[in-house]
Image (cartoon, rainbow, N blue to C red):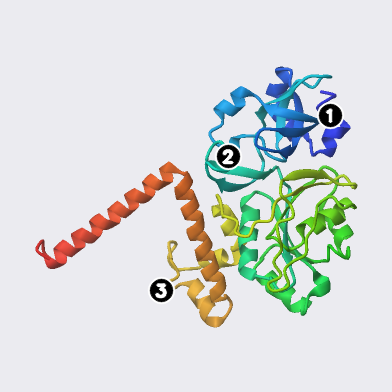
């Protein structure tokens, strides 16, 4: 057990829970490691004795139902072959505590399905730029993704040094982020960076940085690391959007002991498996809906609807309700695209609706309608 409790592993986030999950693999003579970089056919893993290039075992690849079953950045894995001159082989992936996923097709991976972008994350830094590209609807989307990924979101309003009306922008952001810590900062000037690290990136804590391109994610990574680790690029003057400067996902170990996973900028991030994430991201609407007269209220024409009442008296913005419904539809499309059982249930529901409508029409107009 000395290797499993070694200081290098503890610095990577190893804890008694991971040690317990690893016991079957320890009995097989394998050792724990954490994935630092994941490419299509090659991985870099951190072990108690240092970083090593690794490959996936044929059995693990064969049994993978999709890209999501292969090792991802942040995963804890069981490896063999850690001696001098040995080929390090990833034999198994430990069950994930949290995972950020996206859909991929046959052109992006050997198997279609969901790809894990970052695994076993404690906190998600949702970065928004306070320049010309500030967008509340995009914030709602990324917060839903953060909640769905199983991490605690922290909303970082970056570029505070160039904000025209910082106080108003913060109030607007807080209105669409109920229950979420909101911080204003400037990764470029360093304002707020040290406090963020002290509060959320203690030894062994893992964070992921998400947000659209141009919001300053790579600049934030550089500020936290204390060096120019990620290349940064200027945003376009016409729309304040940036080019994607991060082209791969990597686990970055920080000087203070925390861990950061940087992800490529994504302009339109699908809400994958986000039912629970949407409930958390729109907890204000969920709280209102709980007071509706009917438990299955659609907040349209039903009497006793608390959501409609909130719309009428201004407690709830119509744009926020519309955003929730849009993301719910998107989440349902993603679920139906990836889950054959869900598709079958949906087909049965609509068949029942069609049968009911036909019966009603026959009873009202007869069979010769």
- Whether residue 310 is situated above or below residue 72 in the rendered picture: below
User: Disc 1, disc 3: CB below 8 Å?
Assistant: no
Residue 48 disc label: 1
Residue named by callout 3: 303
Going from the N terminus, do you reach mark 1 or mark 2 first? 1
Instruction: Count every numbered label the image shows and give the total.
Output: 3
Residue most toward the left?
Answer: 368
Q: Is residue 290 visible?
A: no
- Whether residue 44 is situated above or below residue 274 in the rendered picture: above
Q: Is residue 103 visible?
A: yes
**Secondary element at tag 2:** loop
Residue 251 disc label: none
Front residue of 140/362: it is: 140
- Whether residue 76 is situated above or below residue 1 in the rendered picture: below
Q: Quadrant of residue 168?
A: bottom right
Going from the N terminus, do you reach mark 1 or mark 3 first? 1
Residue most toward the top?
Answer: 28
Q: Residues within 10 Å of mark 3 (few under 14, many from 20)?
A: few
Going from the N terminus, do you reach mark 3 or mark 2 first? 2
- In which quadrant will I find the N terminus? top right
Residue 109 disc label: 2
Cα separation, mark 3 vs mark 2, equals 49 Å
x%, y% of residue 15?
78, 35
């Amino acid at each position: 057990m000395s290797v499993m409790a070694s200081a290098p592993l503890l610095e990577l986030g190893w804890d008694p829970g991971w040690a317990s999950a690893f016991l079957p693999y320890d009995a097989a003579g394998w050792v724990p490691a954490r994935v630092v970089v994941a490419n299509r056919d090659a991985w870099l893993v951190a072990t108690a004795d240092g970083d090593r290039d690794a490959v996936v075992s044929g059995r693990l690849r064969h049994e993978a139902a999709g890209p999501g079953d292969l090792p991802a950045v942040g995963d804890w894995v069981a490896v063999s072959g850690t001696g001098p001159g040995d080929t390090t082989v990833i034999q198994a992936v430990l069950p994930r505590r949290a995972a950020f996923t996206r859909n991929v097709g046959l052109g992006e991976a050997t198997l279609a399905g969901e790809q894990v972008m970052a695994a076993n994350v404690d906190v998600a830094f949702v970065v928004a730029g306070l320049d010309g590209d500030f967008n509340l609807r995009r914030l709602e989307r990324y917060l839903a993704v953060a909640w769905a990924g199983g991490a605690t979101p922290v909303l970082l309003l970056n570029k505070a040094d160039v904000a025209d009306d910082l106080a108003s922008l913060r109030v607007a952001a807080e209105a669409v982020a109920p229950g979420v810590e909101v911080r204003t900062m400037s990764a470029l000037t360093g304002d707020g960076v040290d406090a963020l690290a002290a509060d959320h990136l203690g030894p062994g804590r893992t964070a992921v940085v998400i947000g659209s391109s141009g919001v300053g994610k790579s600049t934030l990574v550089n500020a936290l690391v204390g060096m120019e680790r990620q290349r940064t690029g200027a945003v376009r003057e016409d729309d304040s959007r940036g080019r994607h400067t991060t082209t791969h996902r990597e686990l970055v170990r920080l000087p203070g002991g925390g861990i950061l996973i940087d992800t490529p900028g994504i302009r339109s991030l699908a809400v994958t498996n986000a039912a629970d994430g949407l409930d958390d991201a729109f907890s204000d609407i969920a709280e209102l809906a709980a007071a509706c007269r009917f438990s299955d209220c659609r907040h349209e024409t039903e009497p006793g609807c608390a959501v409609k009442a909130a719309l009428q008296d201004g407690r709830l913005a119509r744009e926020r309700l519309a955003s929730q419904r849009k993301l719910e539809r998107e989440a349902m499309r993603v679920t139906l695209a990836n889950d054959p059982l869900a598709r079958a249930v949906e087909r049965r529901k609509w068949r029942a609706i069609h049968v009911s409508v036909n019966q009603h029409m026959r009873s009202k107009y007869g069979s010769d309608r």
